Amino acid sequence: VKILAVESSCDETAASVVENGRIVKSNIISSQIELHKLYGGVVPEIASRKHIEKINYVIEEALKEAGETLDTIDAIAVTYGPGLVGALLVGVAEAKAIAFAKKKPLVGVHHIEGHICANYIEHPDLKPPFLCLVVSGGHTHLVNVKDYVTYEVIGRTRDDAAGEAFDKVARAIGLGYPGGPKIEALAKEGDKNAIAFPRAKVNDSKMDFSFSGLKSAVLNYLNHCQMKGEEVNKADVAASFQEAVVDVLSAHGVEAAVELGYKKLAIAGGVASNHAFREKMIERCKEAGIDFYYPSPVFCTDNAAMIGVCGYHEYMNGTRSGWDLNAVPGLKIGSR
Ligand code: ATP
Ligand code: MG
Ligand code: FE
């Protein structure tokens, strides 16, 4: 079964052809980062306009690279939420047009369930049930993956998402957008033990997270230095901040898995591409005797291959979207 997948929920226009939910035949991503950088973050109106310009080329390229055509694929999968409404609408309208014209089944996919499904691409042995720690730009969730199409959120951030914290701290130390990769690069030159930033606990719960306190601690530290006329070592701030995030994420993730009796733990989303995080997870999962899974960086940040994998499982489960499929910016996990 060959799925053509389309993703346009934020600032990446992406298309992919995925076979049988595991084989990625093409994975084309047109990123708008250079454009949004000028404004220090994603500008929704500009994102929608760029998606419209790029989407046909991106799909054409994905089909070409896979050696397929709109006639040889079996179904179209598309992200319909969560995300920016105008951005989502471009992908949804495009997928509907193709499905209608070519009389192919249409399958709406949840973006975060897609991030989780990225783990299946390079781990043929990974099968549900498992626990997944989703750490992206807008979400920090502990998700119980019950089977290929059934998800349950069992923990979440009470305030900022992990990726959001990376982006905000990067802005505060003048690194610009997107913050994650820039903090990671600068952190390599700093001392992760230089500044003792707080590790927030939420009512001693292992299932929930909080990052706004850490973000405030970094901002306070910067203000304090400025008031005293001290020079800020940005590399030390980046390294110490990253260490605090990575420490809390990995500790909670692994403790939750142990407490709930999971033998398998996966990570997903843009922050999952962070090497300090991956290494800490490898170490702590090994100590706890838990099998650890993570996607290659290209499948962590937004892409359409993950949507193709998720779409395949939905398709096989009988999910079919109607011509009334709409963008749902606040779509909840497991809401089907
Ligand atoms: P969501 O998936 O929640 O809707 P999104 O699609 O914008 O949000 P992703 O594409 O999954 O988010 O990830 C982008 C986020 O990941 C950004 O916040 C970015 O700073 C962060 N990120 C990307 N690379 C890294 C990295 N190497 N280290 C830390 N954070 C990173
Ligand atoms: Mg993005
Ligand atoms: Fe995402």
Image (cartoon, rainbow, N blue to C red):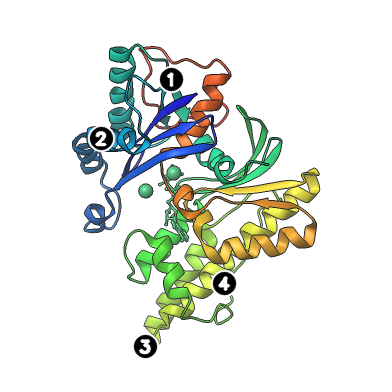
The answer to whether the residues at label 2 and label 3 have Cβ atoms under 8 Å apart is no
Whichever of labels 4 and 1 marks the residue nearer the N terminus, that label is: 1
Sooner in the amino-acid sequence: mark 4 or mark 2: 2
Is 154 rendered above or below residue 259?
A: above
- Judge depth for marks 3 and 4 and give the one in front: 4
The amino acid type, in three-letter code, at marker 3 is: Gly
Location of mark 2 (residue):
55
Q: Residue at x 44, y 51 (%)?
A: 298
From the image, state whether disc 4 or disc 1 is nearer to you.
1
**Mark 3, residues whose alpha carbon is within 10 Å: few (<14), some, or many (≥20)?**
few
Foreground residue, 245 or 107? 107
Residue on which disc 3 sits: 229
Q: Amino acid at mark 4?
A: Phe
Give the number of callouts.
4
Residue at the spot x=28%, y=53% of the render? Answer: 33
The residue tagged 4 is 197
Residue 244 lies in quadrant: bottom right
Q: Residues within 10 Å of mark 1 (few under 14, many from 20)?
A: some
Residue 227 x, y percent position in the rendering: 38, 82
Tag 3 secondary structure = loop
